[in-house]
Amino acid sequence: MNYCDNFTMLLLALDTSTRQASIALCTEDDLYAEYTWRSGNNHSVELLTSIQRLSAECTIPLQQIDAVVVATGPGSFNGVRVALATAKTLAFALKKPLVGVSALDCIAAQQRHWVGPICAVLEAGRSELYAACYVFEKQRKDDGSICYAMQQLSEYLLLTPLQLVEQLHEQIGASSFLFCGELSAASRQVLYTQMGEQSFFVSSVEAARSASTLAMLAQQRLHRGEVNDPLLLEPLYLRRPSITTSTRKQVLLSGPP
């Protein structure tokens, strides 16, 4: 994935993968507005209102956007679904292309200045982490500006912190790693205990996901003609949602007593 191509479109980017939410309206050259806030579990209530406010404050009708971008997860099951359903609805209603980007890609891209492997992480519950590893190559454009090409070094992973350390040593084998994302104190302590001076950590504030970064990742995919079918785009869950079956249905399904 390359940041160096020149292809400017007006994008609306949405990310509600975790309790943190972020939306942005931007092109490659201009950030018209961006809101990032702690939504908790109120994504379904706050997202549409925030989009309308964003459009009104920028005096840019949604009909003028060129594409809709959405974070596909991993993250909160409900949070991911809210942004994805909203993005699909807007893409259908406005007849605009839809692009899905992993939240882990976005987390890593915000640390693209780091020289060496970057491990983007999110807490997955059950003492596990969502994770993926990346490296960025600095490149120089014809006008002298700097851009970055992203290479994903691992699959999207669902592992305990200890298993993640083993995976990084076996498959990547680098001398040091930068960890970034939403990481609990307990998970961070395990990673640091196992890796010591091989591990570096970005603070939660510095690692906060930015919808404008999500848009820039999508900009390159649009340039290559890579769009998603709204009917086929699915959340990147990595773990199946827990489904509770009601006791009443269990009795009915098991037949007569």
Image: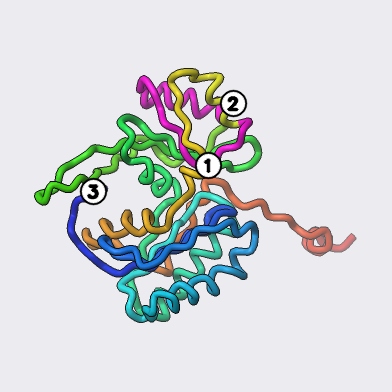
Q: Viewer-proximal residue, 53 or 160? A: 53
Q: Viewer-proximal residue, 77 or 14? A: 14
Residue 158 as seen in the image, left or right of residue 112: right
Name the residue rendered at 33%, 74% in the picture.
Answer: 65
What residue does disc 1 label? 204
Task: Estimate how packed mark 3 is, as few (under 14), some (14 to 19) or many (20 or more) residues with alpha carbons within 10 Å.
Answer: some
Residue 20 as seen in the image, left or right of residue 215: right
Name the residue rendered at 43%, 63% in the picture.
Answer: 34
Name the residue rendered at 39%, 42% in the picture.
Answer: 108
Give the residue type that dot 1 points to: Ser
SS assignment at label 2: helix
Residue positioned most to the front = 57
Residue 177, picture quadrant: top left
Q: Is residue 176 in the magenta section?
A: yes
Per the model, the C-alpha gap separating discs 2 and 1 is: 15 Å
Give how far across and how far down residue 173 sits, in percent: 37, 21
Q: Viewer-proximal residue, 71 or 50? A: 50
Per the model, the C-alpha gap separating discs 3 and 1 is: 26 Å
Tell me the mark number nearer the camera, choosing from 2 and 1: 1
Give the residue type that dot 3 points to: Asn
What residue does disc 3 label? 2
Per the model, the C-alpha gap separating discs 2 and 3 is: 34 Å
Task: Estimate how packed mark 2 is, as few (under 14), some (14 to 19) or many (20 or more) residues with alpha carbons within 10 Å.
Answer: some
Give the residue type that dot 2 points to: Gln
What residue does disc 2 label? 189
Report the number of discs: 3
| Residue stretch in magenta | 161-186
Give how far across and how far down residue 131 sits, in percent: 47, 38
Q: State the quadrant of the C terminus.
A: bottom right
Q: Earlier in the sequence, mark 2 or mark 1?
A: 2
